[in-house]
């Protein structure tokens, strides 16, 4: 680490502790040349997750879009906001743990439906009706029948 005072390239770490609620590490360093102390912060660099839309366009992953979709599906249902937040965190974690930096919007939709099916069946059907774009009552009934069969 380069000393901000004299420019010398070597220093020793005097003290190290977590900062920003564990998101980074604060280090007190001492220059081996001028012996002045300075502070550095070490944070983990994360690569952005890109979403490939149906039309082929790409945009960065936005967790608020997933959350708003869940909120709309669970409107007037007995599902707490904290549960929805945890669901979004879980989906984001699954996506981050994959080796790919690009994920299709269809994959995100499937993850959301998978979680909603366990949380609330009515919310699941609401989300599925928009996500799968049911054309008529028959496709809607087919999805409901699949849900009943899974029980």
Image: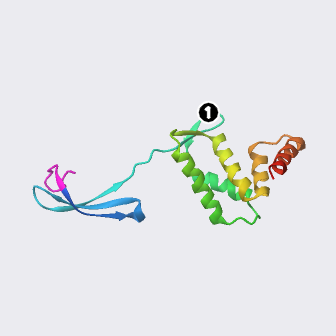
* Total tally of numbered discs in the picture: 1
Residue depicted at x 74% and y 45%:
131
Residue depicted at x 76% and y 42%:
132
Q: Mark 1 points at which residue?
A: 56
Residue 102 locus on image (x, y percent): 54, 38
Q: From the viewer's perspective, tell me whether residue 27 is left or right of residue 21.
A: left
Q: Is residue 139 above or below residue 93?
A: above
Q: What element carries label 1?
A: loop
Residue depicted at x 51% and y 40%:
101
Way the structure is coloured: rainbow
Q: Nearer the viewer, residue 63 or 120?
A: 120
Q: Is residue 49 magenta?
A: no
User: Can see residue 61?
Assistant: no
Residue depicted at x 76% and y 56%:
123
Residue 126 locus on image (x, y percent): 78, 52
Q: In which quarter of the image is residue 136?
A: top right
User: Can see residue 6?
Assistant: yes
- Magenta residues span 1-11
Q: Does the magenta stretch include residue 4?
A: yes
Residue 122 locus on image (x, y percent): 79, 57
- Count neighbours of disc 1 (C-alpha within 10 A) and say few if under 14, some if 14 to 19, many if 20 or more: few
């Amino acid at each position: 680490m380069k000393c901000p005072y004299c420019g010398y390239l070597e220093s020793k770490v005097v003290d190290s502790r977590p900062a920003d609620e564990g998101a980074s590490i604060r280090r007190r360093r001492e220059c081996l040349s001028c012996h002045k102390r300075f502070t550095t912060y070490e944070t983990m660099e994360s690569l952005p997750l890109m979403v490939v839309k149906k039309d082929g366009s790409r945009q960065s992953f936005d967790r608020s879009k997933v959350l708003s979709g869940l909120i709309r599906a669970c409107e007037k249902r007995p599902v707490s906001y904290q549960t929805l937040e945890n669901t979004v965190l879980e989906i984001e974690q699954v996506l981050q743990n994959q080796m790919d930096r690009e994920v299709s919007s269809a994959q995100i939709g499937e993850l959301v439906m998978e979680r909603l099916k366990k949380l609330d069946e009515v919310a699941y059907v609401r989300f599925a009706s928009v996500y799968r774009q049911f054309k008529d009552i028959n496709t809607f009934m087919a999805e409901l029948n699949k849900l009943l069969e899974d029980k």
